Image (cartoon, rainbow, N blue to C red):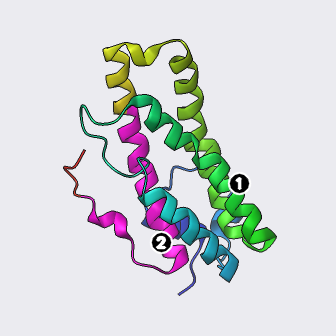
Amino acid sequence: MVTTWRSMLEKWGLSSLRINVRVLDAELHVSQPDRDAAWDLYVELVTRITTQPLGEGDGTEQAALDSVYALFPLTRETIKRHGRHCHQFTRLAVVILNQKIRPFTAAWHRRAEQGAFDDPQQCRAFRAELTELQQTLREYSGLLADLAEVEDLTDLIPDDAS
């Protein structure tokens, strides 16, 4: 069976990503550097607040925001470490960073600098938006597990954990 980016994104609930149609419909050939890079970032995603529930009263909003923001240097370093032969991983990672993570971090960095995390209502709003982003990042981590050819451990997170 031929796999395309479109079918992979649909499988993992990420079909709303805006990607060039030629890329979406092209056959997906995953290289070993793609698999290795996917594994590296997968481990980061499933072991931080990006995919793990943040219970009411647990942690701080600033620490959670910093953890999400840390995905930028982690992703860049992963791409550099695995080189230009991990181009399938890079395509996906850049789209996720720019379309899903950047809007969240850009909005909340500004608000945080303006004291938003001193306001309980803003803290609740942050956590609500974080929960939405976490769902996308769980889907992303599932796709990364697929690319890395490993078991997706994000399924271990109960639906009612957040």
Give left or right: position of 3 versus 126.
right
User: Marks 2 and 1, how far apart in space?
Assistant: 19 Å
Residue 40 x/y as whole percent: 57, 67
* Numbered mark located on residue 150 in the image: none
Please give the name of the residue rendered at 60% of the width and 29% of the height, measured from the top-left corner. 106
Q: Is residue 31 visible?
A: no
Residue 41 x/y as whole percent: 56, 62
- How many numbered discs, if any? 2
Compared to residue 66, the image places residue 38 above or below, namely below
> From this viewpoint, which residue is outermost toward the bottom?
1
- SS class, disc 2: helix
**Tag 2 and tag 1, C-beta contact below 8 Å:** no
* Numbered mark located on residue 76 in the image: 1
Compared to residue 120, the image places residue 34 above or below, namely below
Residue 75, image quadrant: bottom right
| The C terminus, quarter of image | top left
Main SS of the magenta segment?
helix
Please give the name of the residue rendered at 51% of the width and 20% of the height, measured from the top-left corner. 112
Residue 84, image quadrant: bottom right
Q: Is residue 117 visible?
A: yes
Compared to residue 18, the image places residue 157 above or below, namely below
Q: In this figure, which residue is indicated by the disc labeled 2? A: 145
Disc nearer the start of the sequence (2/1): 1
Label 2: how many residues lie within 10 Å, few (<14), some (14-19) or many (20+)? many
Q: Amino acid at mark 1?
A: Arg
> From this viewpoint, which residue is outermost toward the left?
160
Please give the name of the residue rendered at 64% of the width and 43% of the height, measured from the top-left corner. 98
In the image, which residues are magenta? 129-157
Residue 122 x/y as whole percent: 38, 18
